[in-house]
Image (cartoon, rainbow, N blue to C red):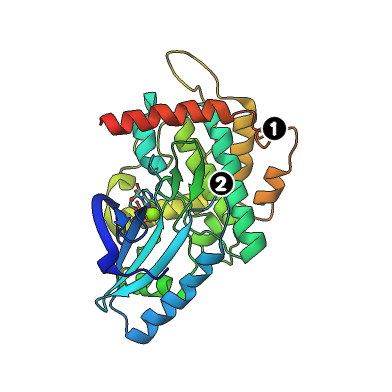
């Protein structure tokens, strides 16, 4: 079916980021609930049409680990509207705020890492797509405990248009050292971003933030960010070793630590690819593909769904 604005009823606002804002909507003709992302764009009509054309590849992305795409159109000559599958537990940046101590349980981290790597492997092997923006707000969860990727950079023209509007759009602390340096980067760059994200979700603290002894990190704006990016390139990579909780004195799981640390090898030649990490039968992900943790994750997702509804 063809989507157009008259058929869409806005139900609620879900949040906004650098590129645009997202709302929960009802597609009236099909009575389907969707998520709608609106991206303001002031490039010329030819470019806008090109963006819509490039986004069409999303119709072919079919995987349980990727958000389903319903369509995109230009509205009033100045916004690109993208309609996609709505995920009722929201993104991980919101979910982590509902967790005790801000920490994801181990079983959840296993299923999550497995799902991200499966999504990345699918995108790359089937469509030659690199995600380019792995971070907690771009991984969504359903009430069934499924994790899905969204917001991957398929449209070169869209990326260009966004980059022109603001140089720092797309610049984030989840970016790999090779990418920050402007070197050629590939799918292993997404593995780095996932590693950082997993440290954050396991420990309950963002990796590059306060308490790191550097006052510049806290200052918003270009200087703070540039300084931080320089540190990502120059310092030893973040790693997971400490205690999981100062009260329970529990250590982080050994397999979790070595898994995360292998994602955060600064030299991308030495870093593993998504399919290498999935292919290790003895490691951190053992049992995930056989469904060993599915029940735990389902129960957990139900709890999260309830917490987010109560809020
Ligand atoms: P950035 O612009 O840097 O990607 P972001 O990911 O936080 O930042 P958006 O992509 O605009 O910003 O998303 C805004 C919020 O909308 C997200 O934080 C997420 O919680 C929510 N969201 C996005 N897509 C969906 C979806 N398909 N289903 C449910 N919630 C969604
Ligand atoms: Mg996003």
Task: Using a 10 Å C-alpha cutoff, classify the residue at mark 2 as few (fewer than 14 neighbours), some (14 to 19) or many (20 or more).
Answer: many
Horizontally, residue 273 falls left or right of residue 12, namely right
Can residue 188 be seen from the camera position used here?
Answer: yes
Q: Residue at the location (52% across, 17% down)?
A: 250
Q: Residue at the location (53% across, 69% down)?
A: 57
Quarter of the figure with residue 200: top left
**Residue 216: x %, y % from top left:** 31, 47
Looking at marks 1 and 2 on the same chain, the residue that comes earlier in the sequence is marked by 2
Can residue 271 be seen from the camera position used here?
Answer: no
Quarter of the figure with residue 129: bottom right
Q: Secondary structure at mark 1?
A: loop
Q: Residue at the location (50% across, 30% down)?
A: 298
Horizontally, residue 229 falls left or right of residue 168, namely right
Instruction: Check disc 1 and report the residue beneath it.
Output: 286
Task: Using a 10 Å C-alpha cutoff, classify the residue at mark 1 as few (fewer than 14 neighbours), some (14 to 19) or many (20 or more).
Answer: some
Task: In the rendered view, tell whether residue 242 sits above or below residue 132.
Answer: above
**Residue 49: x %, y % from top left:** 39, 81
Instruction: Check disc 2 and report the residue beneath it.
Output: 116
Toward the top, the furthest residue is 248
């Amino acid at each position: 079916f063809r989507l157009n604005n008259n058929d869409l009823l806005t139900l609620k606002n879900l949040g906004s980021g650098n590129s645009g804002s997202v709302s929960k909507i009802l597609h009236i003709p099909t009575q389907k609930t969707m998520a709608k992302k609106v991206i303001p764009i002031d490039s010329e009509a030819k470019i806008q049409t090109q963006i819509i054309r490039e986004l069409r590849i999303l119709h072919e992305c079919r995987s349980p680990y990727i958000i389903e795409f319903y369509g995109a159109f230009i509205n009033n000559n100045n916004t690109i509207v993208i309609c996609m599958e709505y995920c009722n537990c929201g993104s991980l940046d919101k979910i982590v705020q509902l967790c005790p101590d801000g920490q994801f349980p181990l079983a959840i981290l296993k299923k999550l890492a497995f799902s991200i790597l499966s999504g990345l492997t699918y995108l790359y092997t089937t469509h030659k797509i690199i995600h380019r923006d792995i971070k907690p707000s771009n991984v969504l969860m359903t009430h069934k405990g499924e994790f899905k990727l969204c917001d991957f950079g398929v449209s070169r023209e869209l990326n260009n248009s966004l980059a022109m509007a603001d140089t720092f759009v797309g610049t984030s602390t989840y970016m790999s050292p090779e990418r920050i340096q402007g070197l050629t980067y590939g799918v292993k760059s997404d593995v780095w971003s996932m590693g950082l994200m997993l440290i954050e979700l396991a420990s309950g603290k963002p990796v590059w933030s306060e308490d790191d002894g550097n006052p510049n990190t806290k200052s918003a704006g270009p200087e703070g960010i540039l300084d931080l990016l320089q540190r990502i390139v120059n310092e030893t990579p973040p790693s997971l070793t400490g205690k999981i909780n100062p009260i329970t004195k529990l250590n982080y799981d050994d397999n979790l630590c070595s898994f995360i640390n292998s994602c955060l090898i600064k030299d991308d030649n030495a870093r593993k690819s998504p399919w290498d990490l999935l292919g290790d039968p003895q490691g951190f992900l053992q049992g995930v593909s056989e469904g060993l943790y599915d029940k735990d994750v389902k129960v957990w997702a139900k709890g999260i769904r309830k917490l987010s509804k109560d809020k």
